[in-house]
Amino acid sequence: MPLPEKTAPENNIAGESIVSVSDLDVFFGLGRETFQAVKHVSFDVEKGSTFGLVGESGSGKSTVLRAIAGLITDWQGTIKVSGQKIDKHRSKDFFKNLQMVFQDPYGSLHPRHTIDKMLSEPLNLHGIGDVEKRIAAVLDDVGLPRTFRFRFSHQLSGGQRQRVAIARALILQPSIILLDEPTSALDVSVQAEILNLLKDLQAEHNLTYLLVSHNLAVIAHMCTKTAVMNNGEIVEVLNIDKMSTLKADHPYTKQLLTASMGYDAEMVDL
């Protein structure tokens, strides 16, 4: 059973940026201990597309995602979502329109709540009815039996837990989903299933994804465009043609591409 259809906001016409980040700086710590984790990051994400942020651990990619989601408040710059400039305090409408799927399905689900409670809670918080119908529909969408509704997360496999996390993100019918390494904590055999599920859901519901990953194979499979991050900065933006042909201009990006194919000392030394 598909989720009920929703009408796209009038300002989200094809080709227009649904997420726009300009000169984003993110800081941690105070005084002399202040550390700038993200430096002057700018990019635009078109409606219905998947935009990737790729880089090594500590490059700042997940920090960018968390700043957009409102999980980090010490930032400067401009963030626009669905044409609206947002500040450090987010409204209910913001969270209805934008949801996030986290890396670890073991840590992101409440261990003492049933799947039913985790899925119904956002609906109750936003005063949305048809709870039974929506939960049944979203479980169908993510490929979980409706009988799972009253199970606890510890009774599910890692892949099933991540499907629940995706269902929780979908339940409010958002336009935008932030994906923070959504498959890195899963067995290799399950990763492809989750990625293909995400692609199917995107096509069915016209979702926009902002995907963070350190895995170029995942980025190439999912994204039409990706920004490469190093030391808190975007060093290069690659389109799907450059990714598929393993072409890059920046030395760091060349290293990442080389690493994705296996270690090549000669290339790394360039």
Image (spheres, helix red, strand yellow):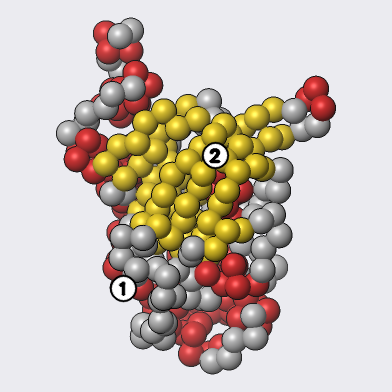
Q: Residue furthest right?
A: 31
Task: State the mark number for residue 23.
Answer: 2
Residue located 48% across and 71% down the image: 174
Q: Quadrant of residue 226?
A: top left
User: Can I make out residue 213 in this image?
Assistant: no
Q: Are marks 2 and 1 in contact (CB under 8 Å)?
A: no
Residue 56 % position (x, y): 47, 30
Residue located 40% across and 53% down the image: 45
Q: Quadrant of residue 75?
A: top right
The residue where tag 1 is placed is 204
Which of marks 1 and 2 precedes in the sequence? 2
Between 192 and 253, the residue placed more toward the observer is: 253
- The kind of residue tagged 2 is Asp
Few, some or many residues within 10 Å of mark 2 (<14, 14–19, 20+): some
User: Can I make out residue 254 in this image?
Assistant: yes
Q: What's the distance in space between the residues labelled 2 and 1, CA to CA?
A: 33 Å
Between 24 and 98, the residue placed more toward the observer is: 24
Q: Circle 2 sits in a helix, a strand or a loop, which is it?
A: strand
Residue located 39% across and 45% down the image: 52
Residue 227 % position (x, y): 39, 38
Quarter of the figure that contains the C terminus: top left
